[in-house]
Image (tube, grey):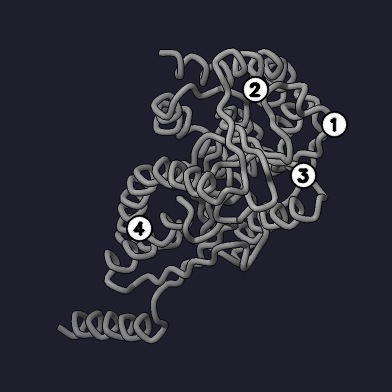
Amino acid sequence: MQIQALVAALALAVSVHASAQGPIVIKFSHVVAPDTPKGRAAERFKQLAERMSKGRVRVEVYPNSILYKDREELEALQLGAVQMLAPSLAKFSPLGVKEFEAFDLPYIFPSKAALYAVTEGPIGRELLRKLEPKGITGLAYWDNGFKVMSANKPLLAPRDFQGLRMRIQASKVLDAQMRALGARPQVLAFSEVAPALRDGVVEGTENTPSNMYTQKMHESQTHLTVSNHGYLGYAVIVNKKFWSGLPDELRSTLEEAMRQATAYEKTIAQNDNDAALEAIRKAGTTTIHTLTPQQQAEWRRIMMPVYGQMETRIGKDVVRAIQRTVTR
């Protein structure tokens, strides 16, 4: 009885101490606006995590690069300054996990169904596992959508890109893609793109309609081409030490919250991009062009050499495994 009483007293002491400490805080940093697919999904995860954990977890969402720019946030995660991020997939290459650059290859995903066959299957899971030695645990893939091109002139044929300073993310694949088109790629952090377009530091960019609209890039870009030439997606990641240190049942609760937030994110991504494109159209600042099948075939032809240039860097096995999966 004395031993049982001692155990009960210790359990009570631990409970009181945990209560005094307050909830576990997850700082979730990202670089886009709250009203983008990623921003809205981050808020949905916050709501789900706090409700499902019954207050044991508090999620603090920091959008719009409030805490870190996209070139800084991965280091912050590894150091434990934040616990959760949702960086674009191109951001993992500087960590040495270059296989993620396969997602940047032009026209590699013919549809969302083909994309999901990769991210939700063995290839997607194996890629996330490659982050573990970097102190990172991958939880989910979040979708944004297919990219458009913009500039202050119509971009309908590859020759229209000749000499243009086009902003890109830090990606060797995107660099090669722009050079194949004849453009001059310029790497800029996402938070710097809108002012750089406004001030003429760069002349054009590629992104999804939702990112362009919420950052008001269309206000300084007179032409937009619906090219769907590339894909922009994210991986939701956490600091591995923090995640593995959570109680098992709480980690399971958060995994379920993430599953639900991810399902929600996929339902809104396309709708948000469609709505953003229509809002850009209605704003009247930007002429929107859609490539004809013949024009798109010419873009594909010009950009296909990028595969040969980048296969060795990314890994032939990864590229070919993706190609086999998307053509089934």
Mark 3 closeness class: few <14, some 14–19, many ≥20 residues within 10 Å: some
Asked if the residue under mark 3 is in contact with the one under mark 1, i.e. CB atoms within 8 Å, the reply is: no
Against 148, is 196 above or below? below
Visible residue check, residue 137:
no
Numbered circle sitting on residue 187:
3
Mark 1 closeness class: few <14, some 14–19, many ≥20 residues within 10 Å: some
Dot 3: element: strand
* Residue that numbered label 4 is attached to: 254
Rendering coords of residue 75 (x, y %): 67, 57
* Residue that numbered label 2 is attached to: 315
Dot 1: element: loop
Residue type highlighted by circle 3: Val
Dot 2: element: loop
Q: Nearer the viewer, mark 3 or mark 4?
A: 3
Q: Which of marks 3 and 4 is nearer the N terminus?
A: 3
Q: Nearer the viewer, mark 2 or mark 3?
A: 3
* Residue that numbered label 1 is attached to: 163
Q: In which quarter of the image is residue 41?
A: bottom left
Q: On the rendered structure, is 136 left or right of 141?
A: right
**Which residue is located at x 67 percent, y 57 percent?**
191
Rendering coords of residue 20 (x, y %): 38, 86
Visible residue check, residue 164:
yes
**Which residue is located at x 48 percent, y 21 percent?**
110
The C terminus lies in which quarter of the figure?
top left
Q: Nearer the viewer, mark 1 or mark 2?
A: 1
Q: On the rendered structure, is 70 left or right of 1?
A: right
Residue type highlighted by circle 1: Gly
In space, the residues marked 3 and 4 are separated at their CA atoms by: 35 Å
Pick whichever, 162 or 235, lies toward us. Answer: 162
Rendering coords of residue 54 (x, y %): 27, 71
Residue type highlighted by circle 2: Gly
The N terminus lies in which quarter of the figure?
bottom left
